[in-house]
Structures are given as structure tokens and as C-alpha cells.
Image (cartoon, rainbow, N blue to C red):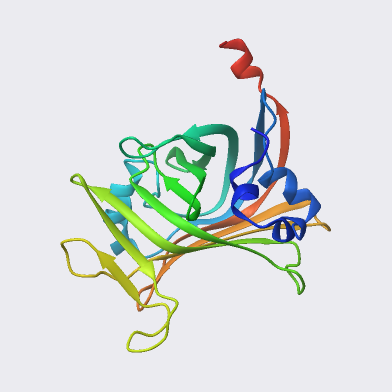
Amino acid sequence: MTRSPYELSATPDVVARLHPRLRAYFGAIPPGHVGRGEGVFDVVGTPRRWLWPVLAVFARDAVMFPVWERHVPFTVENRAAHVGRGTRREARVAVRALRTFHLRGGDRTMVDAITAEPAGLVDHLGRRGRVSARLRVEVDADGPDVGALRLVSTHVAFRALGREFRARRLARRGPRAAGASLLSGPRPAPIAPRVTLVERFDDEADLQRVSLVLTAPVIGTLYRYEGAFRYVIAPDEERGRHG
């Protein structure tokens, strides 16, 4: 693929503001290559144990895990792909990521695929992509995080029992304040979750730093991970061995 989902979804001026070292991470992965990173998460999960039964459900599809641990080694592997969701959906340019957390209780792998859709960037979470988040792309032009990429969810959807339930953040003001939730589906509206992902490059440490936070109004932080890693694009020897 010649352009990554990020490049297809963001305007050229936004891409140009990215830190040069982040352009390799968010740019297109050349044919026959794979992106690999290795580092340590300072924290993973949530200390709110009452949320763990819910997270255990998401863990079955490799989305989130019922843990709260510090100093967790991890690896990430990014591959170019094409992903189609639903019936008669055209396969779209994607980056499929496997993030393996080396937890005390054993390795757990988070799976997702980023696609460039007509409505913008979409992250399909889990092996089956039953959770998806439409993302707004921002790149800081100045300040302490100049050149950092920020992805903020504007719409979250869940597929279950053959139906899709959607929750989106409202941008308008009026009877509903900005940031209120709206759900389309047969059930009463829940509190809309918000995903915020920040990727920045630390020149002094020569490390890429990542922070993901899942929050909900009133409840606060539901899940997070943050840490640092080093990343390279390398020939995909594994794919070569298997054809």
C-alpha cells in the first residue's frame, strides 16, 4: 500500500506536523515488511476491581483485560492489511496491530485494525471487530507535545446479537451539553465512552511514548495503558518463510 490509513484520513498539513520519527510509525508499511516495537508499560488496566467482570467479557475478544499492573513489558507488531466489516463491505486499507502484554499471569494479546473509512479513521477492536471507534486526528503544532499525534473518539459502536449499538459524543451545545451521549438502538442511552490515544516522540530518551485512556462521564477512567518503546520497520522474515 502506498498510503497508510492515517495518511488517507488526515489532511497533508496535519501529517506534515508529525514528529519525523512518528511518520515511520504512522506511515505506510512497505510490502514485505513489518513494524515491530518493544518496551514497557508503566501501567495497564484499572484498579477498579468492580469493572473487572465487564473487562473479562472484552478479554475474550482480545480488546481489554481485567488487570491492574505496573512495569509490564510489551511488544507491538504492525502489518499492512485490508479489512472488511459487515456484509458486502469493501475491504479497506488497514494496519493490523498485535500488542502483547507480558503480564504476571501470562501473556495477553490485544488485537485491532485501523482503517480509512469515508467518515474518517476507524479503529476495529478485537479479533472479530465487534467494538469500533471513529477517531478524530489531531497533531499539536506547538507546546510541550509539538509533533505528537492525538486520536480522540467521536463515535463508538458495539455489535452484539446481530445488532449494532452506537454511542457518539455530541459537539453541539443547547439542551444537551457538548460531550453528552447519544445511543441509537433498542435500549436506553448509556454513558458514551471516550477513547483518547496520544503518541509522541521523546528525543531526549530516544523513545516513543504512548498513552491510551478510556473514560466515561461521571465514572471517570475505565481503562488505560501508558509507557514507552522503540520501533523499527524490518523485512518480514516470518511471512517469507510461510510463503
Q: Is residue 17 above or below residue 182?
A: above
Closer-to-camera residue (150/51): 150
The image shows residue 20 at horizontal and vertical percentages of 80, 51
Q: Quadrant of the N terminus?
A: top right
How many dots with numbers? 0
**Residue at point 72% right, 56% down?**
12
- Residue sitting at x 59%, y 39%: 76
Residue furthest right as drawn = 204
The image quarter in which residue 93 lies? top right
Residue 54, image quadrant: bottom left
- The residue under the point 78% across, 49% down is 21
Position of the C terminus, as image quadrant, is top right
Q: Extreme left residue here?
A: 186
> Where in the figure is residue 121, as x and y percent of width and height?
52, 52
- Residue 144 drawn above or below residue 109: below
Residue 72 drawn at (x, y percent): 56, 48
Left or right, 216 with respect to 98, comes to: left
Spot occupied by residue 170 in the image (x, y as percentages of width and height): 40, 75
**Vertical relation: 84 (above or below) 182:** above
Classify residue 46 as left or right of residue 17.
Answer: left
